[in-house]
Amino acid sequence: MNINSPNINYILRLTYHFKTYTKGFPLIVITEIKLSSKESLVLTCQNIGLNNKLIHIWFCFIIFLVTFEKPVPKVAESDWYYKITELKESCDEHRRHAFELRNESQRLRNDTDVTTYWGTHHTNSKIFDRRIEITRWKNLIELCHKNLQKEIKDLKIEKEKAEKFIEFLNLNFTVTNHCLSIRDERGCADLCQDIASIELKKEQHTLEKLKNLLFGVCQKAWEKINKLEELEIDVAEDLEKKNNTINIDSELLEMTKDSNNISLKPDPLRVPKDFNTYAKWLQQCNILKQTIENELISSTKLRETMFVPQIKTKNDLLAQNDKVNYGLRRRIYDTERIKNELEWQKWNMLTNKDKLLKEIEKLENALNSKLNPKMLVETRCEERLYRAGVELCLDKTTIGLRKEHLELENTTKMLNDKLNQTKALHNILIEQIKVLDEQLKNKTHALDVDQKCLQYREQLDGRSCS
């Protein structure tokens, strides 16, 4: 390598101890100097007190350094002291943190031990209180369960009595339906809603109402029994769940941290889908208790009210039977009266029919008598049309003939109209007589039907529902 090359940079690194060649104290290299020529390097060495031999040795050393050393950045002395100070402070900080961590760890261990102890104690107290609370609810619901079973038994007995009472209505239904059936055989206008039909329908409606009332009572009793039995099943299931809960809580109270049957679970804090809050559980218990009490009260009222329909049935049937018999007798009286009226009307209609027949003959004779005068007038009018010349004029004679012809036309028309009216009225009278005959036939049949109904209902007189 050519050391005289102008492209060579000389580096004076003062980082070594030179005890032999200095002025009585060691030379400590604390920096480095970059030089561009050999003359600069020699001048610098002389300034710091090195002799020529040392300069030569140092120059060779510098050449060696320049030739083989990598140009890396160097740390200043102030940075070096700063790094040492920073390292010391870091060590002090870590030791302080370690001391604080040991103290915090010891305090945490003490706190966790105390917390764990009292947590277990409080949990045991809560489990014990919970078991007492569930036991109290269980005893209360067991009492309601016994009352519920007794009420079901009493309600079944009352239901059987109500079902037997329904059998007393069979004859009344038979008689009423038979009377309604035979009265439907009446024809035309007699098949009407008269007082007898209204009372029979009322009787039928009353019987249906009483029957529905009794059936409704039995139905309500049956539904109430089913509801009470379902409620009994729910109460029994609830009691079973409460007994199971009491057993679980008792087993939990017997467990300690040193028990053999304890272990870690995969997910002990999971929340099931049917998980309830305490407020909801308490609400359900109150609802169940209140439901049992309400059902017992309503069942007791139902049993007490099952006697009322029976007494009401007896009184209503007797009263309605009297109304129906009165309606039939009233209908028979009205039918006989109307029948007599129709017979009198028929006799008058026959008399008027004969009179109209005679009047028709008279009108036909009068109409025939107007034919010849009409022929005379028309012939005269026709002949006067054959006058010649100036004689063919509208004189008083022509005017009089035309007036006479018009009067004959009007007279003939009025007679024809009156004849047609009389014939029409005669036909109407004939039709009306046929209607009267049909009505009389219907009235006679209706009278027979009502009399049969009244006779058929005699078997209900004096009959007791008891």
Image (spheres, helix red, strand yellow):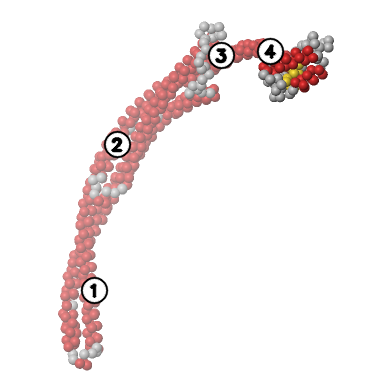
Q: Quadrant of the N terminus?
A: top right
Q: Earlier in the sequence, mark 1 or mark 4?
A: 4
Q: Earlier in the sequence, mark 3 or mark 4?
A: 4
Circle nearer the viewer, 2 or 1: 1
**Dot 2: element:** helix
Query: Label 4, on which residue?
Result: 98
Where's residue 41, x and y in %? 76, 20
Gap between marks 2 and 4 measured at Cα: 104 Å
Gap between marks 3 and 1 measured at Cα: 120 Å
Query: Label 2, on which residue?
Result: 173
Gap between marks 2 and 1 measured at Cα: 66 Å
Query: Label 1, on which residue?
Result: 414
**Is any atom of residue 85 visible in this view?**
no
Circle nearer the viewer, 2 or 4: 4
Circle nearer the viewer, 1 or 4: 4
Where's residue 253, x and y in %? 54, 11
**Dot 1: element:** helix
Q: Earlier in the sequence, mark 2 or mark 4?
A: 4
Q: Earlier in the sequence, mark 2 or mark 3?
A: 3
Q: Is residue 372 left or right of residue 143?
A: left
Q: Which residue is found at the position 22% from the left and 56% from the top?
A: 435
Identify residue type, mark 4: Ala
Q: Which residue is found at the position 61% from the left and 11% from the top?
A: 117
Category of crowding for the residue at label 1, using alpha-carbon neighbours closer than 10 angstroms: few (below 14), some (14–19), many (at least 20): few
Gap between marks 1 and 4 measured at Cα: 145 Å
Category of crowding for the residue at label 4, using alpha-carbon neighbours closer than 10 angstroms: few (below 14), some (14–19), many (at least 20): few
Viewer-nearest residue: 55 or 150: 55
Category of crowding for the residue at label 2, using alpha-carbon neighbours closer than 10 angstroms: few (below 14), some (14–19), many (at least 20): some
Query: Label 3, on which residue?
Result: 128
Circle nearer the viewer, 2 or 3: 3
Identify residue type, mark 3: Phe
